[in-house]
Amino acid sequence: MTIRSLPAVGALLVAVALTAGCGSDDDGRSSAAPSASSGLTPTGVPSAPPSPTTSALVAPVSPSAGAQGPTQRRPASPPPLVLPERPASAPGAKQVVDAFRAAGLKVPRPKDRSVDCGPDGLGLGCSELIATDAVTVYVFPDETSASDIAETWGGQSYQRGAVVLNYLEAKTPAADRPRYEKVLDGLR
């Protein structure tokens, strides 16, 4: 080794020492690289004991600081979904589905999908929504909104007041639909 290469070797040793001590994800166990206080450098050359000025620059790391890991940022939670209220005169979607079941009509696998009524879902502006494999029941905050949607769906829906029955994705034969509509009409 020549005197000309000593600054380069010294810079390399400092870089190795810094990378060995920083950014480590271990839990405090010693690594394969020797520490600065061991008296040997990674190249096996004895090192000088740390001077008071260099040891004062390095802040001691508490064992718990490394165990905490990186800070995790949580996404801001969206504001709670507020749906318009259904009219007091209209039956609820669950009440309609229960009436279908009581009348012996098929309403397999009912799912409350009211969250699809809001701006993040379908954005239809409904108050309540329960989907089954046979029919989907929508309850709107007023009859005008219900009428607008029923017209949009054409012959694939039935409207009574603020409630709309949708058959678009249903497996209900057209011949059975009047039975559902009759039960809905009887709820008023």
Image (spheres, grey):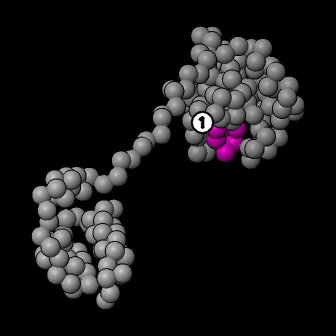
Residue ranking furthest to the bottom = 1
Residue shown at 70% from the left, 13% from the top: 142
Query: In terms of image quadrants, where is residue 183?
Result: top right
* 148 to the left or right of 142: right
Instruction: Choose top left, top right, bottom left or bottom right for residue 94.
Output: top right
Q: Is residue 133 magenta?
A: yes
Where does residue 7 sit, x and y in percent of width and height?
Answer: 34, 74
Residue beneath label 1, please? 113
* Main SS category, magenta section: loop
129 in the magenta segment: no
State whether residue 82 is above or below residue 176. Answer: above
Seen as rendered, the residue at the extreme top is 88
Foreground pick, 105 / 93? 93
Q: Is residue 109 visible?
A: yes
Query: Is any part of residue 104 visible from this angle?
Result: no
- For the C terminus, give its image quadrant: top right
> 112 or 15, which is in the foreground?
15
Q: Quadrant of residue 157?
A: top right
Q: Is residue 78 left or right of residue 16?
A: right
Rendered view: 173 above or below 180: below
